Image (tube, coloured by chain):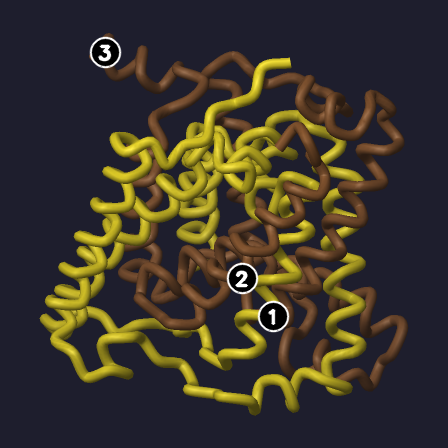
Chain colours: A brown, B yellow
Amino acid sequence: MNWLVKQIRKEEWSPYVAGILLGIVGILTVVLAHALLGASGGFENLAAYIGKAINPSNTYFNYIMPAGITYPVVLLVGIFFGGMLGALSSGTFKFRTMDSEQWKAAYGKQTWKRWLLLFVGGIIVEFAAGIAGGCTSGLAISGGMLLAPAAFLFIGGMFASGIVTALIVYGKKY
Amino acid sequence: MTYVIALVLGVFFGFALNKAGLTKYHKIVNQFRLTDFAVLKFMMTALVVTALGVYPLRALGIITFPAIPETYIVGNLVGGLIFGVGMALAGFCPGTAMAGAGEGKWDYLVPGLLGFLTGAVIFGLTYTSFMPQLKAIANYGSVVLPDLWHINPYLAVFVFALMALVLFYLIDRMGMHRKEKKD
């Protein structure tokens, strides 16, 4: 029992162990909820409120991803509290506005730069998730665990451009 | 009831992301720098474990596969290519940002979430101008590989698990890792 508590309190687990946990959650999601995991879909349901205010007759937010507190939105809330629980269990919960030394080395130590880049990065990934049919959670993990080809096409594309982007950002320090 | 299940599943998902360390900028970007393979190990382990569970359950008739993501080759690939740029730049994706926000990260909660919402609004408002055409190219529908290629599902899962193990072996034992450069 002490051993278990000690493990739970660790800040980081082996990615294999955390992956096994996620895999079990994946099975339970299909069995209990007859649904998949996801994150970008929830943001679309929330964005639908804004989208419909801008263009009330819009097809996408009326028929394909309508506004509402849907299953993916509740999942998002769960993910938020899961992250909180993880941080609390290891005593690493802390309010902060900036990231690690590595971020500062790559982009500089100004907070506004980080906030701007996260905003722009957020737009890019969510728009891209729309095109691909899901994000790392809803497509790569959820599709991949069912062995859907869509997931592996997405993962391939993501790694290819991610590596090139990191090469450009880091230059000689890559 | 579905909401309670969704909430609990979400909590475990966020917890796993936190413990895998993926709520940190360096974990994500260093995967793309090939100096830390936590992202790939975490993802592949989860895929194998779930596949090992859901395929036998489907064969036994206990479950059917829900909402299989649609395969439309060009769109899946192009979406992935654009996604990787944003993910490597910012060091997060929608799921890890949400879990990170729960850890007290205002930068994930405020500009991150505003970015996702903005991206989703732009996508939704422009959807009809290009997505139906894009989705029509090389569209195989909601399909999984064993069904598409008519191979025994158990064999497919076995081969997939074996590929993952080989990948882990290459990463951990054969030096697929790049060494972090010292300043």
Element type where label 3 sits in the image: helix
Element type where label 1 sits in the image: helix
The answer to the question of whether label 3 and label 2 lie on touching residues, with beta carbons closer than 8 A, is no
Residue at 62%, 60% in the rendered image: A69
Of residues B79 and A137, the one nearer the viewer is B79
Which residue is the site of mark 3?
A3
Q: Which mark is residue B78?
A: 1
Q: Chain of mark 3?
A: A
In the visual, does B152 lie left or right of B103?
left
| Same subunit, tags 1 and 3 | no
Amino acid type of the residue tagged 1 in the rendering: Val
Which residue is the site of mark 2?
A157
Amino acid type of the residue tagged 3 in the rendering: Trp
Of residues A43 and A66, the one nearer the viewer is A43
Distance, label 1 to label 3, CA atoms, is 46 Å
How many neighbours does mark 1 have within 10 angstroms: few (below 14), some (14-19), or many (20 or more)? many
Q: Chain of mark 1?
A: B
Q: Is residue A80 visible?
A: no
Distance, label 2 to label 1, CA atoms, is 7 Å
